[in-house]
Structures are given as structure tokens and as C-alpha cells.
């Protein structure tokens, strides 16, 4: 009994050591974002400054247009995720019921394809359609990220939901659409939540599409924070504050939806093999 | 829920009596078609179009002309391409091995029982979901040779100072450090899933036989989580080989071309030099390499499962 308690305390400390790179990194990120230049340039480095530079955050929004870029990110991620759900959830259902899981190999290969190889042809297409300069190219190209996630997770989910209820409903005279909407969809809610969260995270974090397709007015947050680098004088405080603003929404989502994310990623991963 | 159950049994008993369903098999195709259209447009079309572009001399803003395999021939003799291939290999191998090792270790710890386990696991997973560019910028500041916190920490134990991403010989290991920091949690989660599926009985009999902890790990745990390690290896290889955000945000392939991977070279060719015909040829080769790599690994995995079955 005593041995066991000791083991547990020992493991607890091992776990603390393991998470220390994560904790230290984020603490340092917060520290950088709250220090004036003079403190950020100090040697030896200062973790907690005497005066907090809240103005760093104000500067990010006022001088770097972050309200606009935040809104762009919300629009691109929101539209790409909602469209993906509208298209992908029924598709996952159809593929699972058709027993056409093999067709999902397209999605697997899409997962393997480097984002850049979608970017070159779609860039030309958007140029030709005269869409550059609007948010549409980014919304459409983010579907490359979101649709496969949703379809993949929903196939796996609908495979596990019982078919008997659906058969009963169709015997009672319900149309395919009614069966889907009234019987299959309500049961699949947890799967939809998982795919929604993962689609939001991966779309929000996407950077490569934005650097090519975004103009000054249509930048999303990851592109905007990267562009802060190209200004002649890079001051660390505002840069760290901007980085924190970009990633905070995803980190909050990760904390609150931990269970769903783990379920979705490991299901996807296991199926991914 | 009760009424649902009733309907369910009603349907079953109906079938048992031999009354055939009046309806034809439901038509599922309409559910799939919208996705089919979208996937064709944003995923399949780019694949095909890239292939077509790769057979042309095609620079943005100029007339294009058909040149057959010339882009591919040019690629074969391009020293910068071969150099980037070597960087990609090095980067990939390191960013697969390190997270796989550390992630397995972490999974073994988080599989055990101890106070605050769920919370600590939650913290451990955070890097994986964080925005790569944002993370990369903060690492860049930490890597700063004079003012960075990492050199300060190293100086406390009498090492350094290092030049991290600012030196040709340390840039790739430094980038791998960031990649490892971010993606070890994914390996941990996959292996943790594997550990959860392991039966308890073999361990009990091993304990009776007097096996020590290492022997139990080596002869019981490791073979049983092997398929999961294989999955982690496949996913990590795919992601590492096409890693872009971290490298581009931190070094853009520099110093010089010391950290230029194929993906970065591909980007520079297409969007810095606008040589999209040549870029497309590179994309095609890169695509084939990744898919081939994945399928080889998948086949190895299948074999792993087979040998497992035989052993049982």
C-alpha cells in the first residue's frame, strides 16, 4: 500500500518534468508579451517585470489592424467549417451506408498531399476567376483542409451508429432524406461536434494558403502575425502579444473540448492506418 | 429512448414474420454527390492540373509552351533540389525518431495512475493544437544568440552559447526541436490509445514468473503497441516530410539554403521566382514520393499485424 502511494507521487513528479517544456514555453510567451523593450532586451532575462506592458496588446490592435484580421480569420474558418459540415456530414453518411469506405482513399491521399501542390493550380484558377483580393479564395481553399476531416470522421462515426432504426423508419415510409435528418443525424451529434472542432482548429492554424492568397485587406491572423516580422523594427513585446492573440482561441478550445479532440484525433489516427 | 427501443423491436419482429419491407433500398448517392463535386474541384482538379502544368514552360505572366519532360530532366540535374532532398530526409528522420521516442515514454507515464493525471495530460497536449506560426515566432525569439532565453539557460549549466537557427550546422536540429516540442503529444495520444487496449492477464502471469519492469516492457508491452507505434510513425513521417509553417516562419530555408527542404524550395520556385511549371514538376515528384513512402509504411504495418497474428 505504502509502496503504491510512493509510486504515484514519483510518477506525478515525472509527469511534472515532462510537461515543463510546455509550461515554460507558454509562461515565457506570456512574459515576452507583457514586457517593455528594455526588459525584453535585459540580460540575464527577466521572467516577471516590474511594470507590465499592457500597451503591447493595445499596439497590436491599433497599429496592426488586428481587429480586421481577427474578423477575416473568423469568416474564413467559419465559412470553410460550415460548408464542410453541410457537404461532409451527408457524404460521410452516404459513404458509410453504401459501404464505399474504399473511396475514402482519395481523402487519405489528400491528407498526404503537401498543401502547396493544391495552391499552385488553385491560385491560377482564382486569378482567372478574378477572385483574388476577396476572402473567397481562402474560404474555398480551406475546404481542402476541412472537408477531408469532416468526411473522414463522419464515415467512422456513421459506421458505428445502428442501422436498425433507419431501416425501421424507412419501412414506416420515411424518405431517405427524412431518415437521415430525423434518425441518423440526431444520433451522430457527438461525431459532428468532434469534426467541427478539429476542422475549426486546423483551418484557423493554416498559414501556407494565406501567405499566397491573402492581400493586405484579406489577411488571416497567422499571416498577419508573420507579416509583423517584415516591419523594419521588430519589437518582441508586441510580436509575442500578437502570437498569443492568434493562438489563444485554439488553446481555449483545446482546453474545453479536450475529450472530443482526443477522441477525434485518435480515431482518425487509428483509421488513418 | 424507450419508444425508440420499441420501434426497433417492432421492426425486427415484423421482419421475422416474413413481411418484406415495401420500400426499395434507400438511395444514398444524393448524400455523396455534393462532396464529390467539391472534392473534384479543390482536390482532384489541382492534382491533374499540376501534372499538366509540369509539362510546360510556365512562368507567371508569360506565355506558356509545351516542353514535355524537360522540367523533370532539369530537376534531375538540379543540385539545389538534391540538396533540399537531403535536408528533407534529415529533417524527417529526426522529427520522426525524437517524437516517437519521447511520445512513447510520455504515454507509458500517462497510462499509469497518479494525482492530477487528466489535467497534466491536458497541458501536455496543448502544443499540438497551437498555431504553428505563432509558436515558431516565439521560438525564434528564444533562439536569439544574444538575448534569447535558451542560451541563458544553457549558460547556467556551462554550455554554449549556441547560434541555433542562425548557424548552418545547427539550424536543422534546432527546427527539429520545435517540431518535436509541438508533435510529441500526438504520438503520446496514439500510443496511449494502444496501451489502453492491452489486456492485463499476460502481465499477471509475467509477474508470477518474476519478470522485471524492463522485461515486461520489452516482451509484452512493446510487441502489443507495435501496430500503434507504426501508425504514429506513418502519420509523423507524412507530416514531417511536408512540414512548412515552422521552417518558413523561422528561417525561410536559411541561413543560405541550409534548412531548405523540398517543400520550401517548391514554394520559392513557384511563388518567389514564379516558375510554376518547374514548381509543378517538383510538386509531382514530391507527391509521388510521399504517397509511395506512405504506402510502403502501410504495407510494413500490415506485415506487422500478420506476424502478430501468427505469434498468437
Image (tube, coloured by chain):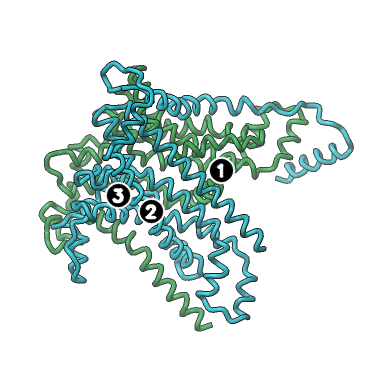
Chain colours: A green, B cyan
Q: Which residue is drawn at 35% across and 21% down?
A: B67
Instruction: Classify mark 3: residues with Cα within 10 Å, few (<14), some (14-19) or many (20+).
Output: many
Which quarter shows the C terminus of chain B?
A: bottom right
Residue B135: mark: 3
Compared with B56, A153 (above or below) is below
**A56 and A163: which one is in front?**
A163
Q: Which mark is residue A191?
A: 1
Q: Count how many numbered circles sit on residues in the image.
A: 3
Q: Position of residue B251 (x, y in %)?
A: 23, 45
Q: Disc 2 sits on a residue from what chain?
A: B
- The quarter holding residue B155 reads bottom left
Spatial CA span between label 1 and label 2: 34 Å
Residue that protrudes farthest toward the right in the picture: B17
Tell whether B83 sits left or right of A58.
right
Report crowding for label 1: few under 14, some 14 to 19, many 20 or more residues within 10 A (C-alpha).
many
Q: Which residue lies furthest to the bottom in this view?
A: A2
Labels 1 & 3 near each other (Cβ < 8 A): no
Quadrant of the rendered image containing residue B263:
top left
Quarter of the picture holding the N terminus of chain B: top right
Please state if B225 lies on the left or on the right of A206 as rendered. right
Q: Is mark 1 on a helix, strand or loop?
A: helix
The location of residue A131, given as percent across then percent down, is 34, 20
Give SS at disc 2: helix
For label 3, the SS is helix
Would residue A40 appear left or right of B104 to someone viewing this image? left
Cα–Cα gap, marks 2 and 3? 22 Å
Tag nearer the camera, 2 or 3: 2
In percent of the image, x 40 and y 33: which residue is there? B284
Q: What residue did someone put label 2 on?
A: B93
Q: In this orientation, does residue A33 appear?
A: no
Amino acid at each position: 500500500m505504502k509502496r503504491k502511494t510512493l509510486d504515484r507521487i514519483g510518477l506525478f513528479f515525472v509527469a511534472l518534468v515532462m510537461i515543463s517544456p510546455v509550461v515554460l514555453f507558454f509562461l515565457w510567451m506570456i512574459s515576452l508579451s507583457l514586457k517593455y523593450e528594455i526588459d525584453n532586451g535585459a540580460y540575464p532575462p527577466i521572467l516577471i517585470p516590474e511594470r507590465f506592458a499592457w500597451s503591447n496588446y493595445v499596439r497590436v490592435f491599433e497599429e496592426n489592424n488586428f481587429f480586421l484580421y481577427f474578423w477575416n480569420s473568423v469568416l474564413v474558418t467559419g465559412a470553410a467549417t460550415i460548408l464542410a459540415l453541410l457537404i461532409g456530414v451527408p457524404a460521410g453518411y452516404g459513404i458509410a451506408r453504401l459501404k464505399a469506405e474504399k473511396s475514402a482513399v482519395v481523402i487519405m491521399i489528400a491528407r498526404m498531399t503537401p498543401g502547396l501542390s493544391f495552391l499552385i493550380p488553385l491560385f491560377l484558377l482564382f486569378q482567372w476567376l478574378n477572385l483574388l483580393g476577396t476572402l473567397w479564395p481562402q474560404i474555398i481553399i480551406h475546404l481542402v483542409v476541412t472537408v477531408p476531416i469532416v468526411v473522414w470522421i463522419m464515415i467512422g462515426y456513421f459506421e458505428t451508429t445502428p442501422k436498425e432504426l433507419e431501416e425501421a423508419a424507412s419501412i414506416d415510409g420515411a424518405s431517405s432524406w427524412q431518415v437521415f435528418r430525423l434518425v441518423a443525424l440526431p444520433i451522430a451529434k457527438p461525431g459532428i461536434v468532434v469534426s467541427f472542432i478539429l476542422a475549426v482548429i486546423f483551418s484557423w492554424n493554416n498559414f501556407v494558403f494565406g501567405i499566397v492568397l491573402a492581400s493586405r485587406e484579406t489577411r488571416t491572423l497567422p499571416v498577419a502575425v508573420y507579416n509583423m516580422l517584415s516591419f523594419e523594427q521588430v519589437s518582441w513585446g508586441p510580436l509575442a502579444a500578437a502570437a498569443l492573440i492568434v493562438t489563444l482561441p485554439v488553446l481555449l478550445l483545446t482546453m474545453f473540448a479536450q475529450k472530443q479532440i482526443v477522441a477525434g484525433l485518435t480515431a482518425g489516427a487509428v483509421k488513418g492506418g | 429512448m424507450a419508444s425508440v427501443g420499441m420501434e426497433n423491436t417492432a421492426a425486427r419482429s415484423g421482419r421475422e414474420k416474413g413481411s418484406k419491407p415495401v420500400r426499395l433500398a434507400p438511395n444514398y448517392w444524393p448524400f455523396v454527390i455534393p462532396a464529390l463535386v467539391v472534392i473534384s474541384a479543390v482536390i482532384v482538379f489541382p492534382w491533374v492540373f499540376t501534372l499538366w502544368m509540369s509539362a510546360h514552360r510556365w512562368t507567371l505572366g508569360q506565355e506558356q509552351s509545351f516542353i514535355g519532360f524537360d522540367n523533370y530532366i532539369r530537376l534531375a540535374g538540379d543540385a539545389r533540389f538534391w540538396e533540399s532532398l537531403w535536408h528533407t530526409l534529415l529533417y524527417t528522420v529526426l522529427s520522426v525518431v525524437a517524437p516517437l521516442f519521447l511520445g512513447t515514454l510520455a504515454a507509458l507515464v500517462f497510462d499509469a495512475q497518479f494525482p492530477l493525471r487528466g489535467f497534466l495530460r491536458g497541458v501536455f497536449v496543448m502544443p499540438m493544437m497551437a498555431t504553428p506560426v505563432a509558436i515558431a515566432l516565439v521560438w525564434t525569439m528564444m533562439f536569439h544568440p544574444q538575448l534569447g532565453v535558451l542560451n541563458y539557460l544553457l549558460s547556467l549549466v556551462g554550455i554554449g552559447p549556441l547560434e541555433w537557427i542562425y548557424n548552418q550546422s545547427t539550424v536543422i536540429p534546432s527546427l527539429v526541436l520545435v517540431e518535436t516540442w509541438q508533435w510529441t503529444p500526438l504520438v503520446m495520444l496514439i500510443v496511449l490509445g494502444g496501451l489502453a487496449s492491452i489486456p492485463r492477464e499476460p502481465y499477471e502471469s509475467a509477474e508470477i514468473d518474476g519478470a522485471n519492469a524492463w522485461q515486461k516492457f520489452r516482451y509484452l508491452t512493446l510487441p502489443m503497441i507495435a501496430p500503434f507505434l507504426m501508425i504514429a510513425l506513418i502519420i509523423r513521417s507524412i507530416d514531417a516530410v511536408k512540414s512548412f509553417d515552422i521552417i518558413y516562419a523561422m528561417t525561410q530555408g536559411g541561413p543560405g539554403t541550409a534548412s531548405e527542404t523540398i517543400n520550401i524550395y517548391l514554394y520559392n520556385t513557384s511563388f518567389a521566382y514564379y516558375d510554376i511549371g518547374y514548381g509543378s514538376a517538383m510538386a509531382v515528384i514530391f507527391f509521388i514520393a510521399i504517397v509511395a513512402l506512405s504506402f510502403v509504411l502501410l504495407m510494413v504495418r500490415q506485415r506487422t499485424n500478420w506476424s502478430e497474428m501468427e505469434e498468437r
